[in-house]
C-alpha cells in the first residue's frame, strides 16, 4: 500500500534575506523609480513591500527589483526602505534606507482665494464650516482649515465639521487652498466663534507647565508604588532615569543588550512590579539583536542590577515594534507588540506579534489566556498605548496605516481586524474600535485615564486627545483636542498618582521630529 503513504511538507519559517541598498532614478515631480538588491530565500521571494516611514507605499511582485512610485508630492524627501516576503508570509528585515527628493514643481501659480468662509451649528466640541471653491490653473487638490497658520484639518471639499474642539473656547479660523505642487492660496476671510460651555463630568486640562527638560526621546514612564518618583526610559540611548515629582532626575542605569532599528525600536516600555517593595523587580521591553524582548531587572531605588530574559521571539523590524507595558488589576503584565511590518502575523494566533500579550512576572503565559499561549487579543498593527479604567477594563491605542488610527476596548480573545480592517468595518468576527481618527490628526502612542476620561498622546497629530468614557458603559463621547501644534510630537501620557494630573512627554528628537538631541520635555497637565 505504498500508494497510500503520504509525505508531509514542513512549514516554511525561514525569512528572506535583507534586500540590498535601494536607490532612486528617473526622479520627477510626482514620481520616481525605486531599485534595490535582490533578496534570497530558501523557497523563493514572492514580493517586495515598499515603505516610507513605516507606511506601505506599494509592492513589487515576483522577482522584480524595481518599482515605479507615483502620486508623490513635489520637492518632498521620501525616506524609503524595502522588505522582502515569501509565499508563507515570512518577512525580511528592512533594507538600508535611501532618502530621495522629488523635483520641485514647474507649477508656481497658487490657487485663487477661497470664497466666503462661514460657521454654523457650534456645540461645545464641534462646529460646521463652509466656504466657496477656489480655482487653479491646473487643479485644487485640497483645503486646509487653519488657526492663523496652524492646520486643524485638511479636506478635499468645501465644507467640513470640526470635531475635538475645546469647550467654552474662542476660535478664529481661516481656509487656504492647495494645488498638487504645494502652492498655497491667499487665505480666506476669518470666522470667529466660541464653543459652548463645558460638561462637568470628568474634568478638562486647565494648565500645563514644564516638569523636566533635556530629554532625548523619553519613551516609557511608570510610577513607583509610593507615587513619589517615576522611572523614565530613553529609547535610543537605553538609559533609565528616576524622576521626582518636581522634575529632579537621576540616571539609575542602562538596559544591556538593547539595540536600535533606526526607526521605532530600542528601549521602549517600562513597568514596576506591584510587589516592588518586597521583590524590587522592574520590567522593560527592548529591541535586541534577534528581536524584541521582555526582560526583568532589579531596582533598589538607586540603581539597576541583574538582567533576566522573560520572553523573546517577538519579531522586530525598523517600524511596528509596539512596546508598551502595563500591570493589570489581576497582577499580570500586559505587553503590546507590533506586527513587525509583516501584517499577516497579526492574524496568526501562534505568533507573538500584532498582539496584546498577558504574562506572569516569571515569564510564563498567564493562566486563563484565551488561546493557551501568551496571546490575549490579536489583529493589532502597532499598539503603543495601554491603560486600565476604574472598572478594570483595558483600553488600547493603535497606529493605523494610512486611513484610521484607533482607540480600542480590549477583550480576551477578540480580533481587532488588522490587516483586513483599518478602523471600523463590517467583517464578521472582527471587533470595531470605540473611536477612530485620521492618521494626520493622531498617530497615537501612550494613553492614560483620569476621572473616567482617556487621554491620548499623538505624534503626527501633535495634540493631546481627551476621550470621555460614557459612565460605566463600553462607549465613549466626542473626542476633544488640546495643545494642537503647540508642543510638537507627543509620545507618552501617564497619570500622576494621588492627583488629577498627567505627565506628558514629547518625542521631537526622533527621526520624524528632527529636533536636536536634548530638546524633548516632560510636562505636567492639571485636570479640573
Image: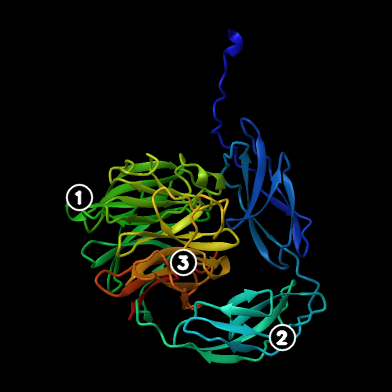
Q: Kindly indicate whether the residue at mark 2 contacts the one at mark 1 (C-beta within 8 angstroms).
A: no
Q: CA distance from mark 2 to mark 3?
A: 38 Å
* Residue shown at 47% from the left, 78% from the top: 483
Residue to which mark 1 is pinned: 279
State the image coordinates of residue 387 (x, y, percent, origin top left).
Answer: 36, 61
Secondary structure found at label 2: loop
Q: In the rendered image of this protein, does residue 237 appear above or below residue 478? A: above
Q: Is 404 or 229 nearer to us in this picture?
A: 404
Residue to which mark 3 is pinned: 507
Number of the front mark, 2 or 3:
2
* Residue shown at 67% from the left, 78% from the top: 143
Q: In the rendered image of this protein, does residue 4 appear above or below residue 8? A: above
Relative to 160, 475 lies left or right: left
Query: Along the polypeptide, which appears first: circle 1 or circle 2?
Result: 2
Query: What is the number of callouts on the image?
Result: 3
State the image coordinates of residue 487 (x, y, percent, origin top left).
Answer: 47, 76
Relative to 7, 124 lies left or right: left
State the image coordinates of residue 464 (x, y, percent, origin top left).
Answer: 45, 73
Badge 3 density bin: few <14, some 14–19, many ≥20, Cα 10 Å: many
Badge 1 density bin: few <14, some 14–19, many ≥20, Cα 10 Å: few
* Residue shown at 44% from the left, 43% from the top: 352
Q: CA distance from mark 1 to mark 2?
A: 66 Å
Number of the front mark, 1 or 2:
2
Amino acid at each position: 500500500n505504498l500508494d497510500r503513504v503520504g509525505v508531509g511538507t514542513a512549514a516554511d519559517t525561514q525569512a528572506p534575506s535583507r534586500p540590498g541598498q535601494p536607490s532612486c532614478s528617473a526622479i520627477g515631480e510626482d514620481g520616481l523609480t525605486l531599485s534595490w538588491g535582490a533578496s534570497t530565500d530558501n523557497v523563493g521571494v514572492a514580493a517586495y513591500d515598499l515603505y516610507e516611514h513605516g507606511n506601505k507605499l506599494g509592492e513589487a511582485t515576483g522577482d522584480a527589483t524595481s518599482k515605479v512610485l507615483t502620486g508623490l508630492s513635489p520637492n518632498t524627501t521620501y525616506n524609503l526602505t524595502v522588505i522582502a516576503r515569501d509565499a508563507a508570509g515570512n518577512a525580511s528585515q528592512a533594507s538600508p534606507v535611501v532618502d530621495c527628493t522629488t523635483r520641485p514643481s514647474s507649477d508656481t501659480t497658487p490657487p485663487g482665494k477661497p470664497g466666503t468662509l462661514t460657521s454654523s451649528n457650534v456645540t461645545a466640541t464641534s462646529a460646521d464650516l463652509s466656504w466657496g471653491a477656489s480655482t487653479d490653473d491646473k487643479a485644487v487638490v485640497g483645503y486646509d482649515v487653519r488657526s492663523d497658520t496652524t492646520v486643524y484639518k485638511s479636506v478635499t471639499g468645501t465644507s467640513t465639521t470640526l470635531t475635538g474642539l475645546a469647550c467654552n473656547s474662542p476660535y478664529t479660523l481661516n481656509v487656504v487652498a492647495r494645488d498638487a505642487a504645494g502652492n498655497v492660496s491667499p487665505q480666506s476671510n476669518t470666522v470667529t466663534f466660541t464653543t459652548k460651555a463645558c460638561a462637568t463630568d470628568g474634568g478638562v486640562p486647565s494648565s500645563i507647565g514644564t516638569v523636566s527638560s533635556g530629554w532625548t526621546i523619553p519613551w516609557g514612564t511608570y510610577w513607583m508604588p509610593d507615587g513619589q518618583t517615576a522611572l523614565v526610559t530613553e529609547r535610543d540611548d537605553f538609559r533609565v532615569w528616576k524622576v521626582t515629582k518636581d522634575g529632579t532626575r537621576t540616571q539609575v542605569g542602562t538596559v544591556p543588550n538593547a539595540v536600535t532599528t533606526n526607526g521605532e525600536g530600542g528601549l521602549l516600555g517600562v513597568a514596576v512590579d506591584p510587589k516592588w517593595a518586597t521583590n524590587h523587580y522592574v520590567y522593560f521591553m527592548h529591541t535586541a539583536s534577534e528581536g524584541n524582548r521582555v526582560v526583568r531587572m532589579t531596582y533598589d531605588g538607586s540603581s539597576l542590577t541583574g538582567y533576566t530574559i522573560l520572553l523573546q521571539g517577538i519579531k522586530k523590524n525598523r517600524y511596528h515594534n509596539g512596546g508598551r507595558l502595563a500591570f493589570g488589576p489581576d497582577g499580570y503584565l500586559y505587553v503590546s507588540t507590533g506586527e513587525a511590518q509583516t501584517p499577516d502575523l497579526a492574524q496568526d494566533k501562534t505568533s507573538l506579534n500584532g498582539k496584546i500579550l498577558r504574562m506572569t512576572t516569571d515569564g510564563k503565559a498567564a493562566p486563563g489566556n484565551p488561546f493557551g499561549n501568551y496571546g490575549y487579543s490579536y489583529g493589532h498593527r502597532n499598539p503603543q498605548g495601554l491603560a486600565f479604567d476604574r472598572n478594570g477594563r483595558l483600553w488600547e491605542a493603535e497606529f493605523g496605516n494610512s486611513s484610521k488610527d484607533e482607540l480600542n476596548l480590549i477583550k480576551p480573545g477578540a480580533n481587532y481586524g488588522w490587516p483586513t480592517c483599518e478602523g471600523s468595518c463590517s467583517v464578521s468576527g472582527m471587533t470595531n474600535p470605540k473611536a477612530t481618527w485620521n492618521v494626520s490628526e493622531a498617530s497615537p502612542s501612550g494613553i492614560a485615564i483620569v476621572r473616567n476620561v482617556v487621554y491620548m498622546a499623538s505624534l503626527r497629530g501633535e495634540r493631546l486627545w481627551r476621550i470621555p468614557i460614557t459612565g460605566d458603559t463600553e462607549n465613549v463621547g466626542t473626542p476633544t483636542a488640546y495643545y494642537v501644534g503647540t508642543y510638537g510630537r507627543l509620545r507618552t501620557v501617564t497619570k500622576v498618582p494621588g492627583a488629577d494630573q498627567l505627565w506628558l512627554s514629547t518625542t521631537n528628537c526622533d527621526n520624524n521630529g528632527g529636533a536636536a538631541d536634548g530638546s524633548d520635555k516632560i510636562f505636567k497637565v492639571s485636570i479640573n
